[in-house]
Amino acid sequence: MNKGVFYAASAYIIWGFFPIYFKLLHSVPAIQIVAHRVVWSFVFLMAVIFLGRQFASFGTKLKLRNILLYTLAGILLGTNWLTYVWGVNAGYVVEASLGYFINPLVSILLGMVFLKEKLRPLQWLPVTLAAIGVTYLTLSYGALPWIALVLAFSFGLYGLVKKVAPLNSLHGLTLETGALFIPALGFLLFSEANGTGAFIHLGWSTTILLALAGVITSIPLLLFAAGARRVSLTTIGLLQYFSPTLQFLIGVLVYHEDFTQGRVIGFTIIWIALVIFSMESYITRRRAALAAI
């Protein structure tokens, strides 16, 4: 398997189980959870850089253009995190999963518009089927799914920035979380000062989960960043269906959110699209390998 595909697929599978993790923190306000994700992620990543003796190398990357680019990426990521955590803990796991079903289409669109990526003729079929499936899911939902739309576009734009960003996954993610570190830490200190902070005050299990949020957050993001630099946005977009499918199943089977006939139809169409895309990609790679012999 292509390394980029492996890295990206691993990230999406880990993200697929995130609802369970954040449901365990339902007693903590979403904005505090996100602030802890930022702070502990930055601490964890800086520790990795220090232990890996990359501090000097990282310092040379702190140029104005890089700082601005990764600050933008950090803002997009923070917006995505806050929307997602709030949605999950407010009982909208299924709608959150819909956002990540829409996101691949956003990634494909951004790749075609900004990076001039082109689809092979047979790839238009699964992309069209995926669009039909997502449209059907949206219509069957019966209301404007604003959570889904914010998640889709914030992460789609984040993927575009990561695709054109110059730094490796570790240094890039460290800059992103570093750009948000001071505001996040300031907010947490303010929460402690006014008596609304959750850290330590809601029991050791909650405190440990908040502290581990940095590791849980950073590992799939590092995998995603490594994968995004190795494969096209089109492939990234279609691989992402692993994550919302797992989230959807968790929302329905674990948290007993609505599972209607319309959603069965929409998900089935999308899975058919994934099978066609996978078969087309395998055949194309196989032909290329044989031609190179």
Image: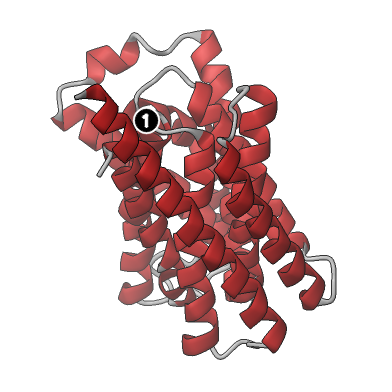
- Tell me residue 174's x, y (percent): 39, 31
Q: Is mark 1 on a helix, strand or loop?
A: loop
Crowd around label 1: few <14 · some 14–19 · many ≥20 (10 Å): some
Question: What residue is shown at x 48% (from left), y 76% (from top)?
Answer: 23
Question: What residue is shown at x 45% (from left), y 31% (from top)?
Answer: 178
| Position above or below: 69 against 132 | above
Question: What residue is shown at x 49% (from left), y 57% (from top)?
Answer: 276
Q: Give the image quarter of residue 78.
A: top right
Q: What amino acid type is highlighted by mark number 1?
A: Arg
Image quadrant containing the C terminus: top left
Question: What residue is shown at x 63% (from left), y 87% (from top)?
Answer: 259
Answer yes or no: is residue 203 visible.
Answer: yes
| Position above or below: 124 against 201 | above
Q: Nearer the viewer, residue 216 or 40?
A: 216
- Tell me residue 234's x, y (percent): 54, 39
Image quadrant containing the N terminus: top left
Q: Give the image quarter of residue 115.
A: top right
Answer yes or no: is residue 192 visible.
Answer: no
| Position above or below: 122 against 287 | below
- Tell me residue 267's x, y (percent): 59, 72
- Tell me residue 105's x, y (percent): 65, 48
Q: Is residue 89 left or right of residue 211?
A: right
Q: Mark 1 points at which residue?
A: 230
